[in-house]
Image (cartoon, helix red, strand yellow):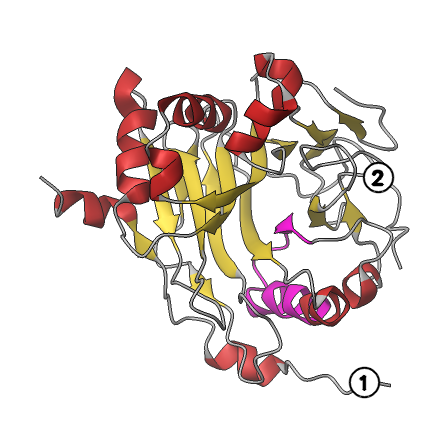
Amino acid sequence: MRALILTTIAFLAGLFAATGCNVEKVLEQLPDAPSNLPATSTTAAPAPGDTIRIASFNIQVFGQSKMDKPDVMQILTKVVKSFDIVAVQELRSAEQDVIPRWLEMINADGENWGALVGPRLGRTVSKEQYVFLYNKGTIEFVEKSDFTINDPMDLLHREPYVASFRAIAKPGVQPFTFTLINIHTDPDLVETELDALGEVYEVVCQANPNEDDVILLGDLNTDYTHFGQLGRIPGIFAAIQGTPTNTRKSKSYDNIVFEPRHTAEFTGQAGVFDLISAYKLTEEKALDVSDHFPIWATFSTQEFTGGAVASAPAGQTR
């Protein structure tokens, strides 16, 4: 049996070193579903209400080239504004002005979005960054809660970026708080990295005993039936099941993973945002945007301490 390489002590040693940055600081320097199983739909995001929509989107090789394509950026901006918070993978740009410039586009209509950007990661010259984009009208960032997982044995090619948030709920309502783990696995090391992510998930859960709503989301480069040690966590659940998440509609790589027994705020709604259908694109045009579709799940804005909004089966992954 493979020894556990990513130890709890190693993770906790680097847990509170916040290596991400708040993009606002950078800007200042620049002149629907059954109750027992979530439906994996391929429509646009559900209508807003007393819920928030958490999404994940691998924007393939996102950098200056895409920024220079107005049609692509218009679609990307519309996509983000369909949700309340989006975990983005595959920001690839040595210049650090991409997200600030995109925020200006997102906020051009008067909305107030913020962003967190993790450090550049990777073993080769092709570095990537994780990003969280969030609507400040519906989501609050828990200050100083973001950090990059400490990986002393270099088991993960791109160590996950973690941050905590709070839904903005109605007056008198206890708001839903949650921690997101943003991840893009190496396609050549999926088995090893999924085992490591099992330990990452458990360590993040244990690190803050006051927060039981931990959600891992991103591009896992495998479907929910091949989660390895991550899938063996008792009660773990994948929101996206049996539906392709890539633009060519041939693979299910992206997911939103959590424990429904703890995250009772999950409404049972989750799905894949089919850009081809939503924006009447050809596959070729959709591939200009990304080789992945966004995925999403909805959660109540109210923190639940007992009972459930929607039940979900124990994880059937392996």
Q: Quadrant of residue 197?
A: bottom right
Q: Nearer the viewer, mark 1 or mark 2?
A: 1
Mark nearer the N terminus (1 vs 2): 1
Image coordinates of residue 234 in percent, x first then y, are 84, 60
What quarter of the picture does the N terminus occupy?
bottom right
Q: Residue farthest to the left?
A: 31
Q: Is residue 286 above or below residue 126?
A: above
Left or right: residue 207 compared with residue 143: right
Residue at the image point whose x is 75% and y is 50% from the top = 259
Quarter-wise, where is residue 94 in the image?
Answer: bottom left
Q: Position of residue 232 (x, y in %)?
A: 84, 63
- Residue 9's place in the image compared with 202, above or below, is below
Query: Looking at the rendered structure, which numbered label has been put on residue 196?
Result: none
Horizontal relation, residue 3 to residue 178: left or right = right
Q: Is residue 162 above or below residue 136?
A: below
Q: Which residues are magenta?
A: 198-220
- Which of these two is toward me, 277 or 24? 277
Mark 1 nearby-residue class (10 Å; few <14, some 14–19, many ≥20): few
Secondary structure of residue under mark 1: loop
Is residue 214 covered in magenta?
Answer: yes
Horizontally, residue 196 falls left or right of residue 12, namely right
In three-dimensional space, the C-alpha distance between marks 1 and 2, rounded to whole angstroms, equals: 31 Å
Amino acid on which disc 1 is placed: Arg
The residue identified by callout 2 is 312
Q: Quick one: which residue is furthest to the front in this view? A: 284
Residue contact between numbered discs 1 and 2, judged by CB atoms under 8 Å: no
* Residue ID for mark 1: 2
Q: Is residue 219 visible?
A: yes
Residue at figure coordinates x 75%, y 40% from the top left: 239
Q: Nearer the viewer, residue 54 or 165?
A: 54
